[in-house]
Amino acid sequence: MIRKCLFPVGGYGTRFLPATKALPKEMLPVVNKPLVQYGVEESIEAGLNQIGFVTGRGKRAIADHFDISYELEHQISGSSKEVYLKSIRHVMEEGIFSFTRQKEMKGLGHAILAGETLMGSEPFGVVLADDLCIPDDGFDSVLGQMVKVYKQFRCSVVAVMEVPEDEIHKYGVIEGEAMKDGLYRVKSMVEKPKKEDAPSNLAIIGRYILTPDIFDILRETPPGKGDEIQLTDALMQQAQDGVVMAYRFKGTRFDCGSVEGFVEATNYCFENLYKKGLLT
Ligand code: UTP
């Protein structure tokens, strides 16, 4: 059973400057809800209610968001405005939140390793909150779909999606042996390849299930692309030593780390969730 989920939220969010000068990018609202809350709701829906954040300097608003605001509670209690607190109250009732800091931003792999103290020796989920994932109708949340894959294979699982050739250089890309139902056994992985070097069009997005042996591998992983400790390199090692599965999820993913993706997500959520009263 998986109970824990790690949120690396240490990044600088430079693509959103000046908005992110004093505000964590994970707190930017998609319509009326901060990005990070979408991720936390997805995690809780998947049954992973022990939430660990790897934060950095200037990210205190995230900790405050998942804590009680007595003043606000007191002021709004019993009024018609109470409905606006519904979703965050639910998240705070269901979730258990803990925090640690990544002192230097040395890459996603480095951030995950900083989270070892929170995740311990259990398998755990990872959500990159700047990827907002909406499942297809009738399907579980994307992380929920991945938990099912984990239960079947008991190994690390990465979420993948097909991307056009001219965008493949932005992603970690897998070479996989196709199995049934959108499942691939990973044979190799490469971080941000040139399109002519990409082994497939299957790009890794910001949802993972990791087995805890990843920490020992990350400790030994030297800096890779961009001089950062790359999670992809550690996963590649795990795939070579054992099994890593890739799962083509049923849903839509918005890259809210980019301004274009953020605006697309905002329009989608406004039309499909907010207008239907589903974003309280
Ligand atoms: P990104 O590179 O997309 O995020 O990292 P960023 O650095 O915040 O964005 P830009 O490029 O400056 O606009 C992907 C994810 O990994 C986390 C980020 O917070 C983001 O969720 N991350 C990355 C860390 O937590 N620590 C790191 O050292 C690097």
Image (tube, rainbow, N blue to C red):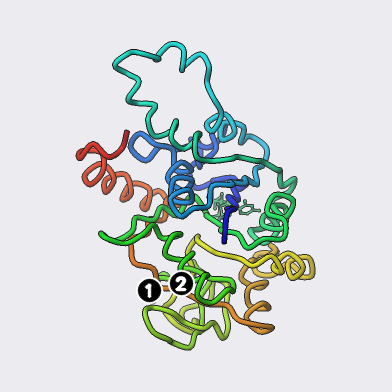
Q: Residues within 10 Å of mark 1 (few under 14, many from 20)?
A: few
Residue 162, disc: 1
Q: Residue at x 48, y 88 (%)?
A: 177
Please give left or right for residue 84 compared with residue 106 in the image. left
Whole-percent x and y of residue 137? 25, 59
Whole-percent x and y of residue 109? 67, 62
Q: Quadrant of the N terminus?
A: bottom right
Please give left or right for residue 89 compared with residue 120 in the image. left
Task: Measure the C-alpha gap from mark 2 to mark 1.
Answer: 6 Å
Q: Is residue 114 above or below residue 251?
A: above
Please give left or right for residue 215 compared with residue 60 in the image. right
Element type at mark 1: strand
Q: In the image, what residue type sits under mark 1?
A: Glu
Whole-percent x and y of residue 188? 58, 83
Residue 153, quarter of the rendered image: bottom right
Q: Is residue 73 above or below residue 137?
A: above
Q: Residue at x 53, y 16 (%)?
A: 70
Out of 138 and 40, give the one closest to the viewer: 138
- The residue most toward the front is 1
**Sooner in the amino-acid sequence: mark 2 or mark 1:** 1
Whole-percent x and y of residue 2? 57, 59
Q: Residues within 10 Å of mark 2 (few under 14, many from 20)?
A: many
Residue 80, quarter of the rendered image: top left
Out of 166 and 191, give the one closest to the viewer: 191
Out of 237 and 44, give the one closest to the viewer: 44
Residue 203, disc: 2
Q: In the image, what residue type sits under mark 2?
A: Ala
Q: Is mark 2 within 8 Å of ligand 1?
A: no
- The residue most toward the top is 75
Residue 84, disc: none
Element type at mark 2: strand
Callout 2 touching callout 1 (CB < 8 Å): yes
